[in-house]
Image (cartoon, grey):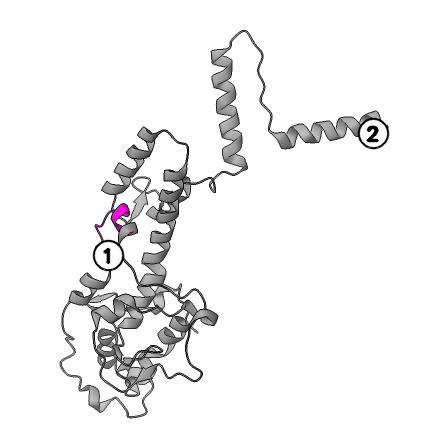
Amino acid sequence: MAELGDTATLDPLISSTPSTHVNIHPDDWRNQNYRFEDIPADMQGHVHTQLQIPIVQASILLPEPKLSVLDLISTFAPPISPSEDQYAAPTNHCYFSTAIGVPDIELMSRITVPPRSIITEFISSVKQQYLNGYNSIRVPNETTPLPLWAIRFWSTLHLEVEPRRSAWSAGVNWLQASSIAPAEIHKTLDALMAMPWTDDISAGPGRSSFQKHSLAQFLSRYWLGEEQMDHAVSSLERKLRAALPSREIFLLDTIFTCTLMHIYREDRNGTTPR
């Protein structure tokens, strides 16, 4: 089964032009008991085209690539169901429908996005479902059938939009509630207002790149590990020695200090060999 996190299983995100497979007559292949793996490449290409988000709808439903981080946080997004248990789907609900899908932007902007597990199942079967004659997808408690490309829209929210939006939102909330100097807070917010939410950051030519939203962890204390704490203690020790040259200053982390005290106590009791 395809995994939602495996982008190789997804079709190209946006379709800006009509299908160019002019020699293909879909009715010759749909509802004919063909398997997707067995049909000609041109017909497979036609199926892929049907599952891409039309460029007009994509520009309305998805954040603009050049939108700033702060604008992304404030942009309204449909709620996402965190798990299948919390997704209110009636028993034996049939998601795929032969009805023609309606690109209802208002509906797609407000309904709860299915959880990852369900979208994973959609991705693994939607090409075959289209070949079997299904034209749309129905979400629970809604009568309007949606186009099959709604699956691509939902997977994009799960994989690209929501992880970045959540990370930056948590970081900005932490920043605004922190005791950091207001001038530094404003400087950081100004930078986030100028920085687009998409694209990776590269350390330079030939160097590896990383996802931009990974920087959001530095708007918290989650990034602090042993390596960073050792660096911080060493830096503080150098600054204190420079400010107080007449004193011998040594800074030790509490784990090291507690270990020395423990060994010392055991040694006094004669339980630790010299």
Tell me: 131 left or right of 124. left
Q: Nearer the viewer, residue 35 or 255?
A: 255
Q: Nearer the viewer, residue 232 or 162?
A: 162
From the top left corner, tell me how far across and down residue 190 is, in percent.
26, 37
Queried whether the magenta region covers residue 219, the answer comes back as: no
Image point 25% across, 86% down: which residue? 99
- Residue 130: name its quadrant: bottom left
Crowding at mark 2 (Cα within 10 Å: few <14, some 14-19, many 20+): few
Q: Nearer the viewer, residue 51 or 220?
A: 220
Tell me: 172 left or right of 259. left
Q: Is residue 61 above or below residue 193?
A: below
- Reading the chain from its start, which is encountered first: label 2 or label 1? 1
Q: Nearer the viewer, residue 183 or 134?
A: 183
Image point 22% across, 66% down: which residue? 14
Residue 269 in view in this figure? yes
The amino acid pointed to by label 1 is Pro
Q: Which residue is mark 2?
A: 273
**Magenta: main secondary structure:** loop
Q: Are marks 2 and 1 in contact (CB under 8 Å)?
A: no
Q: Which mark is residue 63?
A: 1
Tell me: 213 left or right of 233. left
Queried whether the magenta region covers residue 65, the answer comes back as: yes
Which residue occupies the extreme top position in the image? 246
Label 1: state its secondary structure: loop
The amino acid pointed to by label 2 is Pro
Residue 52 in view in this figure? no
Q: Nearer the viewer, mark 2 or mark 1?
A: 1
Residue range in magenta is 62-72
- Residue 126: name its quadrant: bottom left
